[in-house]
Image (cartoon, rainbow, N blue to C red):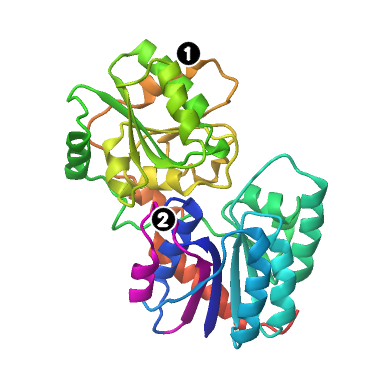
């Protein structure tokens, strides 16, 4: 079976890209010929390309911007025929037009559209995109129900051709690791008696990092042993730097930049902070639980991925003192407990998730044309 997967780029920072890489590395490339069409790796990140190529995935480049993306996609589809499955990962309205192209240029393929975002407010253009998605896709996937409803329409989860593909993670990478915890804390000179909270992700409006820094300032006011370790980068870098200085947090916040060794950092944290303005179903929340790390997230984060009692939610308009008190209460510090029995039973182990995706491909390949 020939499968074409379409993503945004080959970087490691995006949770969507880490999901795609995890999935592709666990698909049986002896049975399936899989190609990935995605943008080049951003210059400040490590590329997932070598690992995917070594696993047998074919790599093809697609511009990672909407203006150039559609013409390049059309050119690729005219030159590459014979796909039985096209699996498009989307977090945008523009990809509804990509679906029209795919159906026109790959009439024999079954189209899976996979939503990874909730991005309010709902607009008329999004409503129009719902119609195009529903008119073109054979199957709809969402990282959670909320993500499916936002991108494809309010009642998409009532349709028989919708399912949730949870953001599973690799048990062999994300697990409690005391050695990694101590190594990272030593590398970044975290004092032995410090309480370490952390963030992993893109520096942008979605992740709400200026509010995160306000929460952290309140945490330090309640307990000056708190230190913050941030992993990532992005367009809000300058604003983050300015906010750190304005709040008097210089020396108490460490920025590690964009890293691919996320499990080590999750183990180093006593608490993972995710006060996002919006999310689909963040893979970082599952990665943290895999490492046994307590999590404090905003109520704007869907609870699909809150598989264990490690995850706690607060509304963004809750007093900063409440955020600080909750952080202090749920993060005792010390070695992390293994929560994989719960994660596996909920379907969040990557190998089993890959087998479920292969079963969907098999099902669709055997279904007649829409």
- Residue pictured at 78% horizontal, 63% vertical: 132
Q: Which residue is mark 1?
A: 321
What residue lies at 63% left-to-right and 72% top-to-bottom?
72
List x then y, in percent, for residue 280. Answer: 58, 47
Q: Considering the image in quadrants, where does the C terminus appear?
A: bottom right
Frontmost of labels 1 and 2 is: 2
Instruction: Tell me the SS state at disc 2.
Output: loop
Which residue is situated farthest in the bottom direction here? 82
> In the image as oriented, which residue stretches furthest toward the top?
221
User: 13 or 39: which is nearer to us?
Assistant: 39
Up-down relation of residue 89 to residue 338 (above or below)? below
Tag 1's secondary structure? helix
Q: Look at mark 2 in the image and give the residue it sits on.
A: 43
Q: Is residue 335 visible?
A: yes
Residues in magenta, as a range = 31-54
Q: Position of residue 359 (x, y in %)?
A: 52, 74
Q: Is residue 48 magenta?
A: yes
| Percent x, y of residue 281 | 54, 47
Give the x, y percent position of residue 285. Answer: 44, 43
The first of marks 1 and 2 along the sequence is: 2
Q: Do we see residue 111 in this rendering?
A: no
Residues under numbered marks 1 and 2 in contact, where contact means CB atoms less than 8 Å apart: no
Task: Tell how many labels.
Answer: 2
């Amino acid at each position: 079976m020939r499968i074409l997967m379409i993503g945004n780029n080959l970087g490691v920072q995006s949770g969507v890209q880490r999901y795609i890489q995890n999935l592709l590395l666990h698909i049986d490339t002896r049975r399936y010929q899989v190609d990935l069409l995605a943008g080049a790796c951003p210059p400040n990140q490590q590329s997932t390309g070598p690992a995917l190529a070594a696993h047998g995935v074919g790599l093809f480049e697609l511009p990672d911007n909407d203006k150039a993306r559609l013409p390049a996609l059309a050119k690729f589809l005219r030159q590459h025929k014979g796909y039985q499955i096209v699996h498009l990962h989307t977090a945008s309205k523009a990809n509804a037009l990509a679906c029209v192209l795919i159906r026109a240029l790959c009439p024999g393929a079954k189209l899976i559209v996979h939503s990874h975002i909730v991005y309010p407010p709902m607009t008329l253009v999004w409503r129009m995109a719902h119609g195009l998605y529903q008119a073109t896709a054979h199957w709809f996937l969402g990282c959670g129900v909320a993500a499916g409803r936002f991108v494809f329409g309010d009642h998409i989860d009532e349709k028989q051709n919708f399912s949730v593909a949870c953001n599973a993670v690799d048990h062999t990478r994300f697990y409690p690791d005391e050695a990694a915890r101590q190594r990272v804390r030593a590398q970044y000179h975290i004092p032995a008696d410090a309480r370490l909270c952390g963030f992993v992700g893109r520096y942008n409006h979605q992740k709400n990092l200026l509010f995160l820094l306000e929460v952290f300032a309140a945490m330090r006011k309640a307990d000056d042993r708190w230190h913050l370790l941030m992993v990532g980068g992005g367009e809000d870098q300058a604003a983050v730097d300015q906010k750190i200085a304005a709040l008097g947090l210089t020396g108490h916040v460490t920025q590690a930049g964009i890293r691919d060794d996320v499990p080590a950092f999750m183990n180093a944290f006593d608490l993972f902070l995710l006060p996002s303005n919006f999310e689909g179903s963040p893979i970082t929340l599952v990665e943290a639980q895999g490492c046994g790390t307590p999590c404090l997230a905003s109520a704007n984060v869907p609870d699909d991925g809150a598989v264990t009692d490690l995850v706690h939610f607060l509304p963004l308009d809750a007093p900063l003192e409440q955020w600080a008190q909750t952080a202090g209460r749920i993060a005792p510090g010390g070695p992390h407990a293994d929560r994989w029995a719960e994660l596996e039973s909920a379907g969040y182990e990557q190998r089993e998730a890959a087998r479920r995706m292969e079963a969907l491909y098999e099902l669709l390949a055997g279904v007649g044309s829409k």
